[in-house]
Image (tube, rainbow, N blue to C red):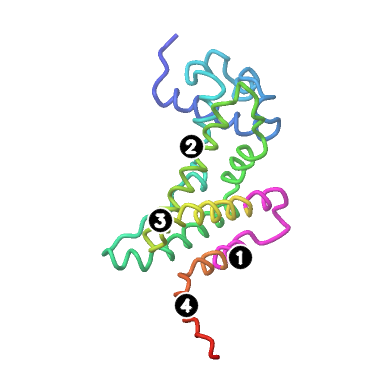
Amino acid sequence: MPRRTKAEAQATRASLLDAAERLFQARGVSRTSLQQIADAAGVTRGAVYWHFRDKVDLFAAMMDRAQLPLEEPPAPHEGTRSSAASAAMVALREQLVRTLALIAGDARVRGLLEIALHKVEFVDELAAVRERHHQAMDEHRAAIERCLRRAGRPAATAADEALGLNALVAGLIHAWMLAPGSFDLVARGRSAIDIYLAGLAPPSAPAAPQRRQRSRR
């Protein structure tokens, strides 16, 4: 048999990833076998192992093709130190809203997100997939924390504030994915993010304690 060209190999790999996306979304990850993926792609099982070590490796490659929004760190703001500090909160807000807009407007991203959120059964064979999901969420939370600290938030509170904001965005996405027509993800998300960030305004300085007056006899 003639050797396959690089382009043919890439086409086969893409076909396998496309088939995995369809089957994972329809059947769930743990209930989809590599043989079923090979059949759907029109190749042999051996071709699957030529490109991927196992199902976890295939799943990771599928997700890497279109990095999910929650795995993307908020974009850093370029500029002077003072301008970066004053604009960091705006940059963070815009990045989070863009994330919601991408999910609402890109069918492929929605499909991958549905697989990641609702079609992965965290059984033993998929422990590495679960670890990837947790790592992605941790990285996103850490990126939000860095943005908050560039915006002047105290280190003592930035971690908790980032955790809350990350949970807010993730919760909005989860709720919308369960019923996409129930609310406008971008409009409601923008409003919720604005309310949360507005609540992070530096508190006013505490009032000076009043001196106790001596009682008169």
Mark 2: secondary structure: helix
Query: Residue flagged by tag 3: what amino acid is it?
Result: Ala
Question: Disc 2 vs disc 1: which is toward the camera?
Answer: 1
In percent of width and height, residue 59 lies at: 55, 29
Gap between marks 2 and 1, in whole Å?
28 Å
Number of disc labels:
4
What number is the disc on residue 143?
none
Residue that carries the numbered disc 4 in the rendered image: 209
Do the residues under discs 2 and 3 have CB atoms within 8 angstroms? no
Mark 4: secondary structure: loop
Residue that carries the numbered disc 2 in the rendered image: 65
Please give the range of residues in magenta: 173-194
Please say whether residue 183 is one of the residues in the magenta stretch: yes
Q: Dot 1 surroundings within 10 Å: few (below 14), some, or many (20 or more)?
A: few
Residue that carries the numbered disc 1 in the rendered image: 187
Gap between marks 3 and 1, in whole Å?
30 Å
Residue that carries the numbered disc 3 in the rendered image: 155
